[in-house]
Image (tube, grey):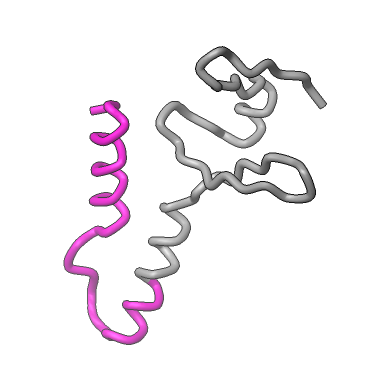
Amino acid sequence: MKEVIVTSDFKVEIPEEVREKLGIKPGDRFMVRIEKGAIILQPIKYREALERLESIADRYLAGPRRINAVRLVEESLDREAGIH
């Protein structure tokens, strides 16, 4: 467990070993909640959720994918995060 410091503008740096282990990159998003007096940051895994959604849609629609929803959402998130 690593100690971190809250800055004057309430930012906290995620330690490098944690970022590497979880594959956290700039622009990644998290859900924040309080659980038993602790702050919990849970990564939002859009790609996995969209892939499951595509799989379900393919089964029910019984046809080829006409659009790549994962790619469209990733590009939108990248633009919003200022990566592109």
Taking depth in this image into account, of 45 and 37 the one nearest to the observer is 37
Counting the numbered discs, the total is: 0
Residue drawn at 45 percent across, 61 percent down = 49
Residue drawn at 25 percent across, 42 percent down = 75
Residue 33 position, x and y percent, is 62, 48
* 31 left or right, relative to 2: left
Residue drawn at 77 percent across, 43 percent down = 37
Majority secondary structure of magenta residues: helix
Taking depth in this image into account, of 12 and 63 the one nearest to the observer is 12
Residue 58 position, x and y percent, is 32, 78
Task: Find residue 79 and report its image quarter.
Answer: top left
Residue 15 position, x and y percent, is 66, 21
Please identify the quadrant where the N terminus is shown: top right
* In magenta stretch: residue 80: yes
Q: Residue furthest top?
A: 8
Q: Residue furthest left?
A: 66
* 69 left or right, relative to 23: left
Q: Is residue 83 above or below residue 4?
A: below
